[in-house]
Amino acid sequence: MRNILILGASGQVAAHARRALLAETDNQLTLFVRHPEKLGAVDPLREKVVVGDALSLADLFRAMAGVDLVYANLGGEDIEFQSANVVTAMLQLHIPRLIWISTLGIYDEVPGEFGRYNKAYLGKGGDHSYLETYRRAALTVSESDLDSTILRPAWLTNRDDVDYELTDKGEPFKGTVVSRRSVGELVARIIQNPDAYVDRSLGVSKPHTAGDRPRLYA
Ligand SMILES: NC(=O)c1ccc[n+]([C@@H]2O[C@H](COP(=O)([O-])OP(=O)(O)OC[C@H]3O[C@@H](n4cnc5c(N)ncnc54)[C@H](OP(=O)(O)O)[C@@H]3O)[C@@H](O)[C@H]2O)c1
């Protein structure tokens, strides 16, 4: 039995990962949230809630006591500061394994017209744009001494399906969309077999969803 810390546990992808981890493993889950009221039902036998902010190193240290693996489902304009704090706290506490949710496009790896659309939509790569801040946050993770897996999901949908394919770093991104449930269940799969995914940065998308625009209803 391991203790998994979920940062941003009230997030939408995290909700699917939580559900899968509770169903498929005997792991204990530590749920790190700014707003516990957003969590919904918590299993008191398997889950512990820690209220905190990833911008606070002290909050992260408090949450990381006794943790074996961290899954960060964070977001926002200050994502690079959050990533720096997460990496610093994990290294100091000798927690080696991190799963980090990022986004498609951080390596300019999305080909064709959809790649151009995605880049323009996500801030044209400007210094403070979503894409650039997410790129710098992912770089902080991948250049650290942690054993990490970075996930780069396509545009997220709330479809209730689990259907995804992966592309490695260095390969052109495939597809345009993927369900949050697919990403959450992939996270649960990685947590159950972490060695297979170590030091990888994976594009995640639904097969057969290529197009010039996100195929949100595919
Ligand atoms: N939308 C897309 O199409 C798309 C595509 C690819 C990747 N992504 C990215 O994938 C990630 C996961 O997606 P999602 O749908 O699960 O996002 P989400 O529902 O917005 O979840 C993000 C979580 O991060 C938490 N958070 C933000 N700042 C925090 C802080 N300083 N301290 C603690 N928690 C903090 C939020 O908590 P609060 O509830 O307190 O705000 C929220 O629970 C996001 O980074 C998103 O940008 C999105």
Image (spheres, rainbow, N blue to C red):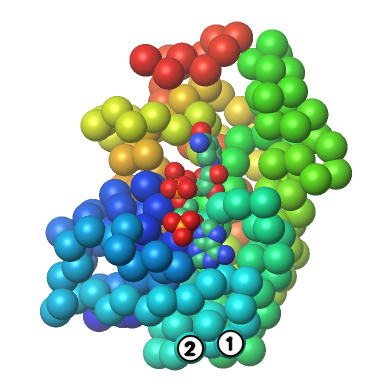
- Write the residue at 45% across / 68% down: 34
| Above or below 44: residue 182 | above
- Write the residue at 56% across / 53% down: 75
- Write the residue at 32% across / 76% down: 49
Front-most of 117 and 24? 117
Q: Is residue 111 visible?
A: no
Amino acid type indicated by mark 1: Ala
Label 1 element class: helix
Residue 44 in picture, x, y percent from top left? 15, 77
- Most extreme residue toward the right is 127
Label 2 element class: helix
- Local packing at callout 2 (Cα closer than 10 Å; few below 14, some 14-19, many 20+) is few
Front-most of 194 and 4? 4
Residue 4 in picture, x, y percent from top left? 36, 73
| Above or below 93: residue 115 | above
| Left or right of 176, for residue 134 | right
- Write the residue at 60% across / 52% down: 76
Q: Is residue 103 visible?
A: yes
Tags 2 and 1 touching, CB below 8 Å: yes
Question: Total of numbered circles in the picture?
Answer: 2
Q: Quadrant of the N terminus?
A: bottom left
| Above or below 50: residue 120 | above
Quarter location, residue 162: top left
Amino acid type indicated by mark 2: Arg
CB of mark 2 near ligand 1 (< 8 Å)? no
Say which mark, if any, is on residue 62.
2
| Left or right of 158, for residue 45 | left
Residue 97 in picture, x, y percent from top left? 51, 72
Residue 58 in picture, x, y percent from top left? 58, 87
Q: CA distance from mark 2 to mark 1?
A: 6 Å
Residue designated by label 1: 58
